[in-house]
Amino acid sequence: MELRAKGLPVPTGSPFTEEIFELLERALKLRRRFLNACDPTFVTDVVSPLFTDLYQLTMLAGYLRHGLHEQEATFDLYIRRAPFEGGYAVWAGLETALSMLESWRFEDVHLAYLRGLGLFDETFLAYLRDWRFRATVTTFPEGRVVFPNEPLLTVTGALGEGQLVETALLNVLNFQTLVATKASRAVLTAANGERAGSVVEFGARRAQGPDGADSATRAAFVGGATGTSNVEAGMAFGIPVVGTHAHAWVEAFASELDAFRAYAAAFPNDCTLLIDTFDTLASGLPNAIRVGLEMKARGQRLRGVRLDSGDLAYLSRKCREALDAAGLADVRVVASNDLDEFVIDSVIREGGRVDVFGVGTRLVTGGGPGGGALGGVYKLVDLAGTPKMKLTADRAKSTVPGRKRVLRVRRDGRALLDVVALEGEDVRPSQLVTDPQNPLNRTRIPSNVEVEDARQVVMRDGQRTHDREELAVLRDRAANDLANLPEGTTRLLNPHVYRVGLSEKLQDLRSRKIAELEASLHS
Amino acid sequence: MELRAKGLPVPTGSPFTEEIFELLERALKLRRRFLNACDPTFVTDVVSPLFTDLYQLTMLAGYLRHGLHEQEATFDLYIRRAPFEGGYAVWAGLETALSMLESWRFEDVHLAYLRGLGLFDETFLAYLRDWRFRATVTTFPEGRVVFPNEPLLTVTGALGEGQLVETALLNVLNFQTLVATKASRAVLTAANGERAGSVVEFGARRAQGPDGADSATRAAFVGGATGTSNVEAGMAFGIPVVGTHAHAWVEAFASELDAFRAYAAAFPNDCTLLIDTFDTLASGLPNAIRVGLEMKARGQRLRGVRLDSGDLAYLSRKCREALDAAGLADVRVVASNDLDEFVIDSVIREGGRVDVFGVGTRLVTGGGPGGGALGGVYKLVDLAGTPKMKLTADRAKSTVPGRKRVLRVRRDGRALLDVVALEGEDVRPSQLVTDPQNPLNRTRIPSNVEVEDARQVVMRDGQRTHDREELAVLRDRAANDLANLPEGTTRLLNPHVYRVGLSEKLQDLRSRKIAELEASLHS
């Protein structure tokens, strides 16, 4: 049977029978899954170059028609506010985004679909067939702590290439940065307790779609979570997987004690017991202690007890006391149930004795005040050597025009402020820099500092310039950066505002452009 | 060159050379993308059976070890509260979920990963190799309007099968139901205006990952959105794609007027102009009108103008007046910029004249009060014929035990209340039903009503019992249901609470189980 008969897009005259085809399909499916196991960016596997807003394609067709598509354009991606009303963001999603840019090709099936929309001519479709991302990407390393109003990522290349990737870049980087930042807030808070608690991610069931879960797991790990319950993401990204059991397990046995004993028998080396199925203190805890002592007598160790409801501060204290009194000091207390950084903070302040916080929904959806989505934007700042800006009624929100560099100013390894300057502009101590949102606020770069380029070229002419980094490297970078910020920058509420300043030349350029645009409006 | 040398899991002795392998890989990639184009559930393509919380696997291994895995178990999936503090939910994601259940297989690579965790023995891995989802799924048809505290979906089958699918079912159904409901709220609100506005989905760049975007587009369409800017989702699900241009387009030309003329020349049949790049009323609107009149003179039609900032009520009125005065009454006003149902409501109340609302972030992330995630849960309610329940300190939150049916009570086609009864139990007018959260609240099923089974078996022993439904059918079902609810049920704030009642027999069973569990606790 010919494959064409099945309506599959196999070239006419293909010698492959259906049987071989299916055999290979199976092999390839395995291969894909195998690659997934090694590939930190497997979620991009289904992201096609059609993952874009229609207007990117119509604009691109228009640029082509008017001969503008090859003009060299520079786009800056930035955020205007830190998420969660906080003072920083953890930059995440870059590896995912770069893999996507490398792999995008318009296949026949995409072109056929676009043709069917009736919007595009054959010249444009032929252009898309040859389209590759050949631009240059300059950005902060993934895992770095970054701030509002500085260009986090810059794409320089043909207008048609920079324009088309906007939607997908924003999608991936907005989401992973949101979640990595959320994770870091929970992780820093949990570590403050007497028990120096850690955070594991438990959110798959409430995440926004399967890769909403998987890429959230990845980002949470970059932000400092130590493990996940999501096995697929654990496999894909090499992240430790953790888990206990559910209430259903307890209900499947004649009694809670039977259920605990059965679980301990099945998992003597990794047994954490959920103790709130019936009554935490009256039933779950004493049963768990009994099983813990039985395990101890067998030379095994009960790893933990998990609380999933009730007053976690009170219950965790009671658990700790009872476990310690029973000689089970090495049994950890795990707590879950609608946690986030604020609840963790409250549990700790009220004397909770939690070792591991299982954080779900609000972590993987980046929920809470100032959360839900990161408002990253992607703006044209230069076209064919002419700085461009988008004026807004509130001038403070106008874009910052021009091709830029970003410098991080440190003293003794600690970050002090970031300076956004013009490309090639020299930046030195004692120079004045200006608040991007209000030129009344100016500050002088202090002396005795190191000034370093904060960003690097990660892709030149569409080719990566570095090897892919291990997830653990990104995670360490984030942890190190978070430990070296000005005091108060990571505070949950009303944080210290880390300074980002525009260089004098950049500030001058922006003022000139505003004046120019205003003049043209009223001419 | 042998493929094994590349570390790929191809059987030893495979006769396929790398060249053939790569050729076929390309063909299969095309095939997959081709299928995507026809397949409303393509996002499941990367969802493996490892997309589950680790504890599902450890419990399953434990059940197997203790010989419990084949016991017949029934799990109910339900929500405790309607999202967005509203009065209903639009049931969505079912087709996606069923495709996933059908396709799940543990491949060698998954088993190898699980083996590497050191938690599981070979008996369990052999069981997983043969694992198929062979259970029976009973649920509301997709698109149906549903309510808290009734079983939305029930899985009946071997304990090991029902348990393993919990995480993925919740992920897909929670998210799509959240977004479909959010969309319906915006759509119903937009339709209230003088212009009977419609809603299009513009959220890809702020969605939670690529399939967070694509599956949100699908769900938004089920909930009543008329189109999307997301081309990939448009192709995958056959949803109309819509778009205009961005500010960058305007900045790429010497003047706004040039940019508008260029766009009109490129897209004479689908030209919507973004008019807020410099100044909406002073520049964008007059330039758009000029181009609209030029198009009219050429026998073409300017399709719309788009507002993306500022006071949308005021600006849309001004646009409408100016367009009408210029003889461009058929040019539509499109508005976007952080919209949701509440902003749309306010724009309409203040006399806004918007034809199309482009809703982004808050739609695709299901944001806003009571949003961000749907708290659907999945609970064991029967095991081997014994009703099961999870007691909670707040008894109102305890599960409802037993195998159930759900009946929808209608009068003249309008839904009045839903009754949850025991499987096989007869339900008739004039019977008493009890509020699941408070037995003090009881009501009598009115007379002169039709009582119909609200759910159906959609998968029996792992096989679908119906053909896949077209997305348009689901969408029509939702629209029809929304139009036939008790007055006030769709109100944005403080809605009428649609009644869901437990039958007398079910209420008796639940009371008995509570008493039984309480007694065992204090014995």
Image (cartoon, coloured by chain):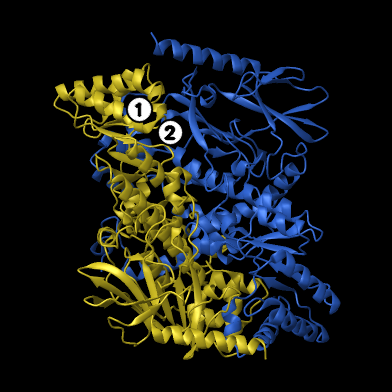
Chain colours: A yellow, B blue
Instruction: Residue at the far top: name it.
Output: B523
The residue singled out by tag 2 in the image is B163
Q: Residue at x 66, y 71 (%)?
A: A117
Pick the quarter of the image with the N terminus of chain B: bottom left
Q: Is residue A515 above or below residue B115?
A: below
Kindly indicate whether the residues beneath marks 1 and 2 are on one polypeptide chain: yes
Residue A421 visible to an observer of this rendering: yes
- Residue B72 lies, with reference to residue A70, above or below; the image says above
Picture residue at 63% right of the left edge, 54% below the top: B220
Q: Quadrant of the C terminus of chain B?
A: top left
Q: Residues within 10 Å of mark 1 (few under 14, many from 20)?
A: many
Please determine whether, in this image, residue A518 is positioned above or below residue A225. below
* Residue B111 shows in this picture: no
Instruction: Name which residue type carries label 1.
Output: Tyr
Residue appearing at x 85%, y 77% in the figure: B325
Rendered residue at 48%/35% (across/down): B134
**Residue A14 versus residue B197: which sits nearer the camera?**
B197
Amino acid on which disc 2 is placed? Gln
Distance of label 1 from label 2 (alpha carbons): 10 Å
Measured as percent of width and height from the top left, residue A472 is found at 25, 58
Chain of residue at mark 2: B
Q: Crowding at label 2, few (<14), some or many (≥20) Cα neighbours within 10 Å?
A: many
**Where does residue A57 sit, x and y in percent of width and height?**
58, 75
Residue under pointer 1:
B63
Say whether marks 1 and 2 touch (CB < 8 Å): yes
